[in-house]
């Protein structure tokens, strides 16, 4: 077993290991997927989330053992990068990797603090009457711009992967989750607009985001609106076509 603990939590390493040992029988289930399970539990007095990445198939096990960084380590490393660049995400506490005698990855865990959030971007996207919708969209755009300025290309920048916490005086904090698919480089303005495409934006939302991003980037609003609208439409068509083909295949 390999365990890496953030320096702030080093004194709690034994308690962290106990959380892993009792993972399958303890804690409250949040998500149970085909490839991972997320539970909440307590580390001392602090509520934390534990993400369990199940054993991959033999091919992926070889890939993650010798050629690629594991999802648990990526989540931990990327969270630290975000925090070091003043981008909010649940605080990274530790990650654990279990390997067999040949060094092949068996399973892994990522532990982070729990955020008591008010809603995700998904609720706002699907409700045109959501309170302060445009204000939140403008602030979310500023958050994404800050992320882009820090050279973060979040490949899963989708409605469910941003938690929103309402603060005082109409201010909102945004926290990125599900971090293991990122890369870090300078992004062109086209790539920055492309990064919004998974948000499933309406034309009205495209206008709000393009206007806010234009002010921050000193790019022409009309240009950003055209690029973002095109990226959004292309993505929606792609997903709609994929769903249609799945239904067609399912009938045969």
Image (cartoon, rainbow, N blue to C red):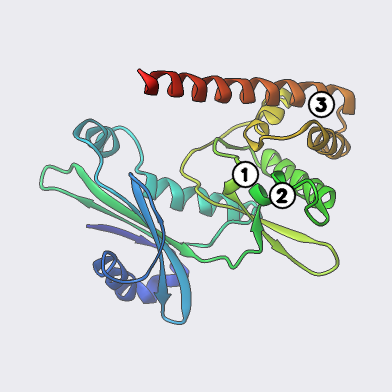
* Residue ID for mark 1: 159
The disc label shown at residue 124, or none: 2
Q: For the residue labelled by badge 2, is the local secondary structure a helix, a strand or a loop? A: helix
Of the two numbered discs 1 and 3 in the rendering, the one whose residue sits closer to the viewer:
1
Q: Position of residue 33 (x, y in %)?
A: 37, 48
Marks 2 and 3 sit apart, C-alpha to C-alpha, by 22 Å
Front residue of 227/37: it is 37
Within-10-Å neighbours for mark 1: few <14, some 14–19, many 20+? some
Dividing the picture into quarters, in which one does residue 41 lie? Answer: bottom left
Q: What number of labels is visible?
A: 3
Q: Residue at x 76, y 67 (%)?
A: 167
Determine whether the residue tagged by mark 3 lies in a helix, strand or loop. helix
Labels 2 and 3: the sequence-earlier one: 2
Q: Return the mark for residue 224.
A: 3
Query: Cβ–Cβ below 8 Å for labels 1 and 2?
Result: yes
Q: Quadrant of residue 104?
A: top left
Quadrant of the image containing the C terminus: top left
Where in the figure is residue 208, as x and y percent of width and height?
84, 38
Q: Residues within 10 Å of mark 2 (few under 14, many from 20)?
A: some
167 is higher (above) or lower (below) than 153? below
- Residue 200 location, quadrant: top right
**Which callout, 1 or 2, points at the residue further toward the start of the chain?**
2
Q: Nearer the viewer, residue 164 or 69?
A: 164
* Nearer the camera: disc 1 or disc 2: 2
| Local crowd size for mark 3, using a 10 Å CA cut-off: few (<14), some (14–19), many (≥20) | many
Query: What residue is shown at x 50% (from left), y 25% (from top)?
Result: 243
Q: Give me the residue at 67% from left, 49% from top.
A: 121
**Where residue 191 sits: x, y (%)?**
67, 26
Q: Is residue 151 left or right of residue 113?
A: right
């Amino acid at each position: 077993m390999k365990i890496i603990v953030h320096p702030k939590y080093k004194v709690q390493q034994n308690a962290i290991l106990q959380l892993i040992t009792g993972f399958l029988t303890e804690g409250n289930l949040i998500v149970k997927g085909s490839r991972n399970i997320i539970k909440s539990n307590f580390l001392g007095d602090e509520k934390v989330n534990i993400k369990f990445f199940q054993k991959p198939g033999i091919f992926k096990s070889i890939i993650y053992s010798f050629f690629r960084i594991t999802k648990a380590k990526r989540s931990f490393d990327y969270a630290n990068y975000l925090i070091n660049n003043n981008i909010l995400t649940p605080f990274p506490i530790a990650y654990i990797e279990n390997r067999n005698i040949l060094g092949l990855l068996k399973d892994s865990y990522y532990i982070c603090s729990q955020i008591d959030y008010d809603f995700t971007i998904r609720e706002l996207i699907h409700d045109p009457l959501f309170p302060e919708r445009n204000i939140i969209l403008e602030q979310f755009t500023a958050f994404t711009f800050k992320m882009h300025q820090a050279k973060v290309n979040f490949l899963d920048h989708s409605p469910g992967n941003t938690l929103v916490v309402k603060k005082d005086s109409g201010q909102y904090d945004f926290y990125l989750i599900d971090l293991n698919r990122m890369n870090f480089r300078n992004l062109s303005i086209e790539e920055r607009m492309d990064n919004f495409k998974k948000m499933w934006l309406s034309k009205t939302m495209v206008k709000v985001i393009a206007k806010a991003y234009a002010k921050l980037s000193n790019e022409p609003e009309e240009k950003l609106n055209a690029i973002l609208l095109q990226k959004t439409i292309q993505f929606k068509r792609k997903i709609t076509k994929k769903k249609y083909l799945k239904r067609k295949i399912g009938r045969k």
